[in-house]
Image (tube, helix red, strand yellow):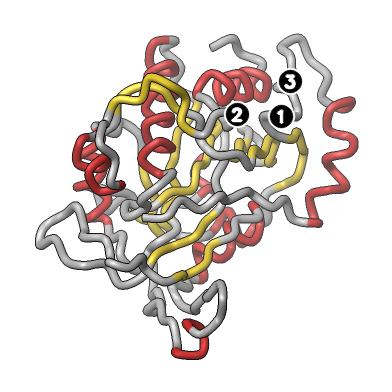
Amino acid sequence: MKTRIKYLVIPISLTLALLTATGANAASIAQPPSSVGTATTVSVPANVLAANFLDQNGMQHSLAELKGSTAILVPLLTLCGDTCPFTSANMLKIQQALSESKNTSIKVIGIDVDPYRDSPKRLLAYAKLIGANFQIWTAAGKTTVPTLTKADLAKKNPIGTGDINPNLLAIEKFLGYSVNVIPQGNPPATDWMAPYEKLTYDIDHSDGFAIIDSTQHLRFVSGTLPAFTGTISKTLANFMGSSTNVYKSPVYKGGWTPAQAIQALSWVTQTKL
């Protein structure tokens, strides 16, 4: 599948807070550099807090329930053929670091951007495949079928419609996620999961992470690709068309690393992790 460079676009509604966040929140643990992301202090709107999701075990969730905890939210999908396997591998490293520091007040959560295909059952298969010990949330409720019309496909860079879910849209709009339905490659990729069907569309989406603090304010936003070194699932490596599942040199060099995410979490919580 073709690699698509995707960046998180910070909404205009956040920019006023970005200008003052650094000075207003000066503290003993250093803020990550601007190359990693941007500090902010924006209250999470009620509609975003109330948006309904299901995790890989079919349990219902919302951001409202996380009050009192800090959460790092990371966009992904199970059928991403370029960045998401590295994103989820970075998330595993973050969760491992939190476990080693015995920190239970920080939650690592994947926000799925393909709710039409990614049911809880599929998320559970993905979680088992990668050995995930963190939650992955898919939007609850009705999701429209992704479509690409002949007129869409005739365009140089076709973008279709669909995969629209009001719960996902609420969090996408607030966090500035760009999520677009695009054509599948030619020849189309084959699903890594049985019954191994050919894929009919792809999702072009933002990368990065966002941190919401215990008072339910957005405190840090990163929009870079996941820099990764290490080992990923052989199944996902094959799905991406990679000849190896071991990456000794950084993938997406210059992107966000688990260490940088931990630094951002340490700064937000003022807790050494």
Mark 3, mark 1: which one is toward the viewer?
Answer: 1
Disc 1: CA contacts within 10 A as few (<14), some (14-19) or many (>=20) = few
Res. 142 image quadrant: bottom left
Q: Which mark is residue 254?
A: 2
Q: Residue at x 77, y 38 (%)?
A: 41
Disc 2: CA contacts within 10 A as few (<14), some (14-19) or many (>=20) = some
**For this rendering, which residue is in front, 126 or 49?**
126
Measured in 3D between alpha carbons, the distance from the residue under mark 2 to the one under mark 1, in whole angstroms, is 9 Å
At label 3, which amino acid type do we have? Gln
Q: Which mark is residue 35?
A: 1
Measured in 3D between alpha carbons, the distance from the residue under mark 3 to the one under mark 1, in whole angstroms, is 11 Å
At label 1, which amino acid type do we have? Ser
Residue identifier under label 3: 31
Q: In the rendering, at what x and y percent does residue 44 appear?
A: 67, 49
Q: Residue at x 66, y 55 (%)?
A: 176
Secondary structure category for the residue under label 1: loop
Q: Is residue 238 left or right of residue 205?
A: left
Secondary structure category for the residue under label 3: loop
Q: Are marks 2 and 1 in contact (CB under 8 Å)?
A: yes
Number of numbered markers: 3
Q: Quadrant of the N terminus?
A: bottom left
